[in-house]
Image (tube, rainbow, N blue to C red):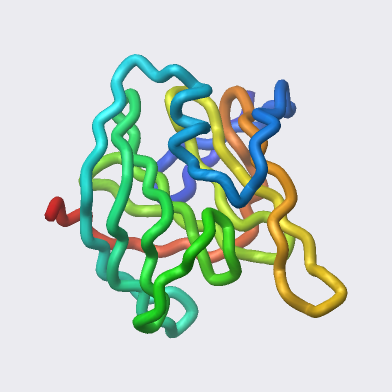
Amino acid sequence: MNELTQGGLRFSPEPIVRDTGLSAGGNISKVVDELKADTTESFELVLDSIIDGKDMFKITKGWRIDGDLLVDSGIFLEGKITGRLVAPGHVVVVAREGEALMGVECEMLICCGKVGGKVVSSEIILGEDGEMHADEIYVKRGRFVNCEGSEFSGRIHPM
């Protein structure tokens, strides 16, 4: 199967195999519990980076799962923290420590990343009011390909 490298992770195309059924406004820790990863470590970290000219300088919560790093809510975008899991301006980052970080934010896909051998992604839709609204959270087996969005690098700084 063809693979590509994006943000320090290897991605290969695989079909969606199941839907967690969680609402996108829920806490991603429920996804972590659903995956029943063998190794889960909760921690805090700080990320310094710039995406599309905007400073994204702090992430406050994350999990290390099977050697991968999953970062969830608590991203400050130009000094304002996002409140929901996949709110507008929110990016979910997945990386291996010491490697480049990858985050996705765009109209049809707001986040993706490998977690415990699977991929967590969230599709969003553009509402009539012009705001982005979350649809559902999907867990995909394998890797996710065709990630359209912002790729950025940064260093992981444990707090």
Quadrant showing the C terminus = bottom left
> Which residue appears at 72% of the width and 57% of the height?
124
Which residue lies at the image location 38% right of the left edge and 65% below the top edge? 75
Q: Position of residue 57 (x, y in %)?
A: 29, 72
Looking at the rendering, which quadrant does residue 140 occupy? top right
- Residue 73 picture location, percent across and down: 42, 56
Lateral position of residue 58 relative to residue 133, left or right:
left
Asked whether, in this view, residue 19 is left or right of residue 147, the answer is right
* Residue drawn at point x = 73 percent, y = 75 percent: 131
Q: Is residue 118 above or below residue 136?
A: above
Q: Position of residue 10 (x, y in %)?
A: 47, 36
Quarter occupied by residue 130: bottom right
Total residue callouts: 0
**Is residue 25 or residue 130 the one in the foreground?**
25
Asked if residue 78 is positioned above or below residue 33 in the image, the reply reads below
Quarter the N terminus occupies: top right
The relative height of residue 14 versus residue 26 in the rendered view (above or below) is above
Look at 71% across and 44% down and name the residue there: 136
Residue 95 drawn at (x, y percent): 35, 44
Q: Quick one: which residue is furthest to the left in this view?
A: 159
